[in-house]
Image (tube, grey):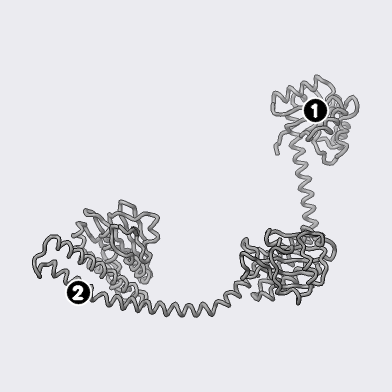
Amino acid sequence: MSDKPTHILLVEDEAAHAELVRRAFEARNNQVRLEVAGSLSEARARLADAPALPDLIIADWRLPDGEGMELLAAQPELPAVPVVIMTSHGNERVAVEAMKAGALDYVVKSEATLVDMPHIAERAYRQWQMVVERKRTDEEIKRLNQNLSRRARELSALNQAGQLMASTLDLDTLLERLLEQVRGLLDVEGASVLLRPPDSDADDPELVCAAIAGLNAEMLVGKRLPLTAGIAGWVVQEKCPALIADAQHDPRFDPLADANSGLITHTLLAVPLTYKGQVLGVVEAINKSDGTFDQHDQAVLEALCSSAAIAVENARLYATEQQRATALARALEQQRELDRLQREFIQNVSHELRTPLALIRGHAEVLEAGWLGKLQPEQHKSIAVISRRAQMLTKLVDDIVGILTQEERGAHKEPVDMAQIVQASVSDLQSVASQARLTLAAEITTDIPLLLGDAMALRRALDNLISNAVKFTRAGGRVTVCLSHNQDTVTLQVADTGIGIPGDQLHRIFERFYQVDGSATRQYGGVGLGLALVKEIVQAHSGQIRVDSQVGVGTTFTVLLPIV
């Protein structure tokens, strides 16, 4: 709402004064529509015929056919339109009389006041808005005070009802308590709860009568009803309450309900039981004792159903979980047996693969060394491929066995010298780095404390990190292994200047069998077990591992191992 009037009715019989006021408004605010009436009767006619009342009336005290204050006679306490009274001969009596009549302001006409009329009008309009708002606030406070004690009693009852329903996970007990609360809070002849059964077909949905109070329960409890029938079905489909003053003449009412219940339904209030946007069922209250249901009754039942829906869902979930508990235990036992058989199978296959792989690698080395005769260049290439692929298979078998071993026994705890492990790993992999035409270097600070862990597992993890860095770093690049410590932690970093890892794939590189380049034509070998094994080893040592990478710049793996 604007704090300035935009449509003003000026009731003034002196044309010169009216023209002076008009020019004042035009000079100050050209958006104001000023309408002029020369008499009281003309003003009344304009107000009666106008499609909307003006924002403000400025009326002369003395008019040819009466007084301007007569425009206030209809609503002296709070006029529908604020009125400013002006007169040529003012005195205190006239001012008091004008204010008592309901005028927002009273001014003595002069050239100065007429010129200042836009400011006077704005001030009066703002004052009127404040009066209206204060009146509205007073009425609201009065209404709230009148309802306070009743609402307090209802809130207390609803709170007790919620606690009572939440105290049980037995659905039948819960519904019985719910209906007791409905009858007590609303004072009704009967009440019922209809629920959507868990086995209800989505193509042919139904409601089942789950509980009844005050009606013929034996005939109705357990009865299934299609959602296309009755008021309850309408409530579920529309997801909104139904407040009915005359059920017998409501087209949604199903007469069979009365035939089965032994009761004639006159007034009815039905509210959906809604949990997280899903309608679980409907609560119906039938025949209010002291008349018809109103919006307040609906609000009370909706509040009760809000707590009841949570309790119903919890009771259903509890019953479902109870039914599934035995089946879940059996399934878990079967899963353990499958896991055991899987581990045994992988271990057996890995063991069976190691012997032929060793023979393949051995014969390839013999052929490549020329011990069985000189090889042609193309034969050298084929033998190199055989040797390289045999090494990859051996690495895969070792990783699989390493993961299985790690799962079964965890970390074997003994004092470990990480500096010695770094030196040994870097030394052993120097030849691999040289073949790839890379620089592999170690940077180890002094006085690295001993850790409590599994030296063999930590060595395997470091070998995997370095091998991974070498594999993804192009010729001329560098791989650096740094080892440092602070008071609580030993920090191991393996940094390379390789191809890097896209940011959207960093969160998945430690998953088993995940490969950054999973295409059939990918350039780099491996099956995605190396980093998964590294993570499991680090976690078995109560450590943490993180990765930072930038495509085209390089990757750094950081391992934090606690000093115990």
Q: Answer few, some or many: residues within 10 Å of disc 2's Cα (few below 14, many 20 plus, some between 14 and 19).
A: few
Residue at image position (17%, 65%) is 383
Give whichever of 207, 67 is nearer the camera.
207
Residue at image position (63%, 64%) is 275
Q: Is residue 479 visible?
A: yes
Residue at image position (23%, 76%) is 355
Q: Is residue 411 visible?
A: no
For residue 86, what is the image quadrant? Answer: top right
Image check: 168 left or right of 112?
Answer: left
For residue 508, what is the image quadrant? Answer: bottom left
Tell me how far mark 2 sits from mark 1, CA to CA: 113 Å
Residue 324 image offset from top left, x and y in percent: 55, 76
Q: Answer few, some or many: residues within 10 Å of disc 1's Cα (few below 14, many 20 plus, some between 14 and 19).
A: many
Image check: 175 left or right of 43?
Answer: left
Q: Which residue corresponds to mark 1?
A: 10
Residue 131 image offset from top left, x and y in percent: 78, 41
Picture quarter with the C terminus: bottom left
Do tag 2 and tag 1 residues touch (Cβ < 8 Å)? no
Residue 464 image offset from top left, x and y in percent: 29, 65
Q: Is residue 246 above or below residue 361?
A: above
Q: Nearer the viewer, mark 2 or mark 1?
A: 2
Q: Is residue 266 above or below residue 39?
A: below
Image check: 468 left or right of 161?
Answer: left
- Residue type highlighted by circle 2: Leu
Give whichever of 401, 541 is nearer the camera.
401
Q: Check the image and name the residue furthest to the top.
A: 16
- Residue type highlighted by circle 1: Leu
Q: Check the image and name the residue furthest to the front.
A: 203
Q: Is residue 517 above or below residue 259?
A: above
Q: Which mark is residue 359?
A: 2
Q: Which mark is residue 341?
A: none
Q: Secondary structure at mark 1?
A: strand
